[in-house]
Image: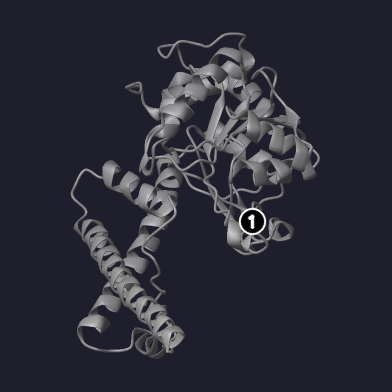
Amino acid sequence: METSSNNDDNREKVCLSCLASPSPIPLNSPPLRDNENELCIKYNINNQFNKVLIVGLGQLGLPVAKYVNEKGFEAYGYDISREAMERAGKIEGLKKSVDFKEFDVYILCISTHKPDDMFSPQLDGLLSIVERISKEAKNGALISIESTIPKGTSKKVFELLNHRLHVVHAPHRWYALEEKEHGVNQLRVIGGVCDCCLKAGMQFYNGNNGVTNTITGTNSSDSNNALLHLDSNSNNSNYPNKTLKRNDNKNLGIPMHAVSKVEASETTKIVENAHRYLQIAFAEELYLYCQENNMSFSELRDALNTKWNVNILEPREGIGGHCLPKDTKMFLQSSKNENKILTAAMQVDEEYRKFRSSLERDTKFVRDIESIEKKQEKTNNYHR
């Protein structure tokens, strides 16, 4: 679906006006009067978030649902998998939702890969959920997309919602193997389709009325430190430095780094993983280099990592999981020009995997021969 050709200013006026109007206002509607604009901004600042629906209860969604529940919100869960719904209810005591009506916030934690190919990006599942939300959700609710998405998806979601709901993208940084250090409440990036969307998102995540940037602190207890509050009347391209009164409404207490354009938050996540992909690919190529030159990779790696600004990673079975390969492809697909370095990194990973596979075959062959020889030796000893 193509997005509207109207500019961001017109789109924001529609987003603002929907909060004070029982039905969506056409894109070609006249500019808002000052008092209408002030009323909408006041509505956003004082908005209450109580009833939250987490859509997608897998590896990402379940920890998010647990955190939201623990923060005192009326948390509900939804997943197309009945097993996932039952697991969430049993493990976290999460309430099940059969419809998408009357929620204040929708947190989307839906997989964005093909069902039969976890390495390839696909948005069908996410967009189908958005279409259902568009039919059932109330005006002015907040949708936060925590799934990894390509650039331009948030605005497409906004269009599918007929401009009735606030849309933000707050990509997750949750890491299952280090949940204590890198859990749901670590420093995150957030962007909104409109200025008012971003304000609503910031209020939900850390309780601030205006757009804020967290300069220091990565724990939720540090979210009040060194915050730059921005005027509620500012636009996306010109934020004056102005302090706003803090809103004490219930929030998630997560430190957030706000960006002025939602495309920046969308790109942040896929670039993070593409960068990680490059780091691992370089380690793989260095490993192959050591094999070709009869050198110890581990010894060379330890020597290199003694330098303060060098951190060579350890290559293992190849660049696994589904996030790094999928998100790197997502980044490549969103690029207008060929990204030669990432393309080369994918080739390196393929070569490394082939080498590991041949090495494992050779090792298995040697082990099989040794096993046969041992069995033969036992047989000979038996007949002596």
Numbered disc 1: secondary structure: loop
Q: Can the viewer see residue 22 in this picture? A: yes
**Residue 155 position in % (x across, y down):** 42, 29
**Residue 176 position in % (x across, y down):** 59, 56
**Residue 37 position in % (x across, y down):** 58, 23
- Mark 1 residue crowding within 10 angstroms, few (<14) / some (14–19) / many (20+): some
Which residue does the numbered mark 1 point to in the structure image? 183
Q: Which residue occupies the foreground of this view, 37 or 373?
A: 373
Residue 250, compared with residue 3, is above or below; it is below
Q: Which residue occupies the foreground of this view, 339 or 249?
A: 339
Look at 25% across and 60% down and name the residue there.
350
Quadrant of the rendered image containing residue 38: top right
Could you tell whether 116 is left or right of 136 in the image?
A: left
Residue 227, compared with residue 308, is above or below; it is above
Look at 36% across and 52% down and name the residue there.
325
Q: Which residue occupies the foreground of this view, 248 or 112?
A: 112
**Residue 377 position in % (x across, y down):** 39, 85
Q: Can the viewer see residue 33 in this picture? A: no
Could you tell whether 97 is left or right of 295 in the image?
A: right
